[in-house]
Image (tube, rainbow, N blue to C red):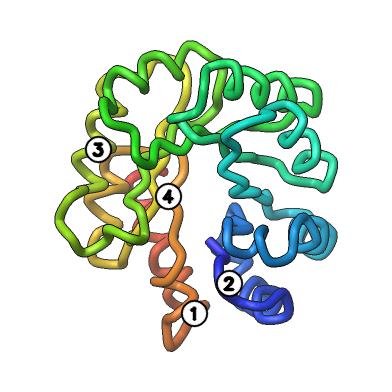
Amino acid sequence: ALDTLTTEQCIDLLNQTGHAVDIAEVGTPFIIEQGMSPVRTFKKLFPHIEVLADAKIMDAGEFEADKCFDAGADIVTVLGVSYDETIEGVVRSARKHNKKVMADMIAVKDLAKRTREIDQMGVDYICVHTAFDIQGSGQKDPLTDLKVVNSVIKNARSAVAGGVKPETVDAIAAEHPGIIVVGGAICNAADKAKTAQEMKERMQKHEL
């Protein structure tokens, strides 16, 4: 997850870590600051890496998703708290472009119920997300939430984001989510390439 770095810093980081990274997420703060420009840049420079546009779409689903996919995004996020019609619009856009949708379950109150509903809408991933603003508060445990999602999904794959660290990645990977999003643990590491490689190897141990 790339949220607070400049485009140049991100390119340098992906040059260091690209061997161990499957997906480059253009984070919401990055999109707010620079729009779709980083999506286009990363897709051009790193064609072997999938680009996730963390647009957190909450309205005008098909229209906004079209913009992301047209810019080269492989995966686009829509908020699980959105109206069903919005999520369905993002899914329609993804099908037109032969791309993927991730439903971000941040702030969803009844996780099991909403997961069951969204799982019927054709999304590719349902992502439990510990919000940045409450990380460290103890209000949310991504591992517990991941187990809830895994217990009810039948069609989509699960994903997890928010505060994933080297010391927590093994327990998370053991639940076999389709995607594990890692941000600060790599971006702020002293040896970014080594940290990315080590985390990837620990995920692969669990056949992720």
Front of the two marks 3 and 2: 3
Secondary structure, mark 3, is helix
The residue at which mark 2 appears reads as 17
Cα separation between marks 2 and 1 = 7 Å
Q: Position of residue 31 (x, y in %)?
A: 67, 58
Q: Are the residues tagged 2 and 1 within 8 Å (C-beta)?
A: yes
Q: Quadrant of the C terminus?
A: top left
Cα separation between marks 1 and 3 = 28 Å
The residue at which mark 1 appears reads as 192
Q: Earlier in the sequence, mark 4 or mark 2?
A: 2
Determine whether 144 is above or below 6 in the image.
Answer: above
Q: Position of residue 67 (x, y in %)?
A: 80, 40
Type of residue at label 2? Answer: Thr
Q: Seen in the image, is 147 located left or right of residue 5? A: left
The residue at which mark 4 appears reads as 180
Q: Seen in the image, is 132 located left or right of residue 82? A: left
* Residue depicted at x 80% and y 46%: 72
Cα separation between marks 4 and 2 = 15 Å
The residue at which mark 3 appears reads as 145
Q: Are the residues tagged 4 and 3 within 8 Å (C-beta)?
A: no
- Picture quadrant where residue 137 is located: bottom left
Q: Seen in the image, is 104 located left or right of residue 107? A: right
Q: Earlier in the sequence, mark 3 or mark 2?
A: 2
Front of the two marks 4 and 2: 4
